[in-house]
């Protein structure tokens, strides 16, 4: 059986090498290996009581390396998210998003004022992304009726919203 000092001197270099092979970072590998020794020392300062210290050390280092990798992934994800949001932090972006949200709110409100048949057709066409044939089958009506409801719905939206047809269609396409 080995003492703490003897175990440290015997296994530290090979455990550092092992950890570095897993995480590919020499400094972090050394820190991980030292932390494993410290944690084991805190649990049982007398290493002679461990039956298979070598196996315990390798398993502990492996697990610590896997935890390190997971933490690095979380940190990287947080950095990417922060960079993404920082990129869009400009006032122009924020104002554009506010305008877009308000336009969508007005379009939704106008859609709710359409007659029920037109509203269902417009919903299936623009929100669900169905084509005219699929809408006709879904509602058990003719394709001609679908097209008529679509045309009347767009006309009604243009009138209620007071914007050009292209803007209404562009907004509907992004619902």
Image (cartoon, rainbow, N blue to C red):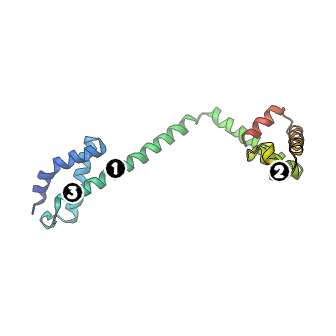
Question: What residue is pinned by disc 2?
Answer: 120
Residue 170 visible at all: yes
| Left or right side of 161 for 1 | left
Q: Which mark is residue 68?
A: 1
Looking at the image, tell me whether mark 1 or mark 2 is earlier in sequence order.
Answer: 1
Image location (x, y in percent) of residue 135: 80, 48
**What residue lies at 17% left-to-right and 61% top-to-bottom?**
53
- Spatial CA distance of label 3 from label 2 is 66 Å
Q: Which mark is residue 155?
A: none
- Asked if disc 1 and disc 3 are in contact, CB closer than 8 Å, the reply is no
Image location (x, y in percent) of residue 8: 14, 53
| Left or right side of 69 for 30 | left
Decide: is 164 above or below 119: above
- Asked if disc 3 and disc 2 are in contact, CB closer than 8 Å, the reply is no
Question: What residue is pinned by disc 3?
Answer: 57
**Element type where label 1 sits in the image:** helix
Quadrant where the N terminus is found in the figure? bottom left
The image quarter in which residue 95 lies: top right
**Element type where label 2 sits in the image:** helix
**What residue lies at 9% left-to-right and 56% top-to-bottom?**
6
Mark 1 or 2: the one toward you: 2
Image location (x, y in percent) of residue 128: 73, 47
């Amino acid at each position: 059986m080995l003492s703490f000092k003897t175990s440290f001197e015997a296994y530290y270099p090979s455990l550092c090498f092992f950890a570095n092979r897993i995480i590919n970072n020499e400094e972090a590998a050394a820190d991980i290996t030292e932390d494993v020794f410290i944690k084991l020392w805190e649990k049982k300062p007398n290493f002679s009581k461990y039956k298979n210290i070598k196996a315990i050390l390798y398993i502990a280092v492996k697990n610590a390396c896997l935890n390190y990798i997971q933490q690095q992934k979380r940190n990287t994800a947080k950095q990417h998210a922060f960079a993404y949001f920082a990129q869009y932090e400009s006032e122009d972006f924020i104002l554009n998003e506010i305008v877009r949200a308000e336009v969508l709110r007005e379009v939704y409100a106008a859609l709710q004022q359409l007659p029920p048949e037109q509203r269902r057709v417009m919903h299936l066409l623009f929100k669900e992304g169905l084509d005219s044939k699929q809408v006709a089958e879904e509602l058990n009506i003719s394709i001609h009726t679908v097209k008529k409801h679509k045309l009347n719905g767009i006309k009604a939206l243009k009138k209620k919203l007071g914007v050009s047809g292209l803007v209404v269609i562009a907004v509907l396409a992004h619902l």
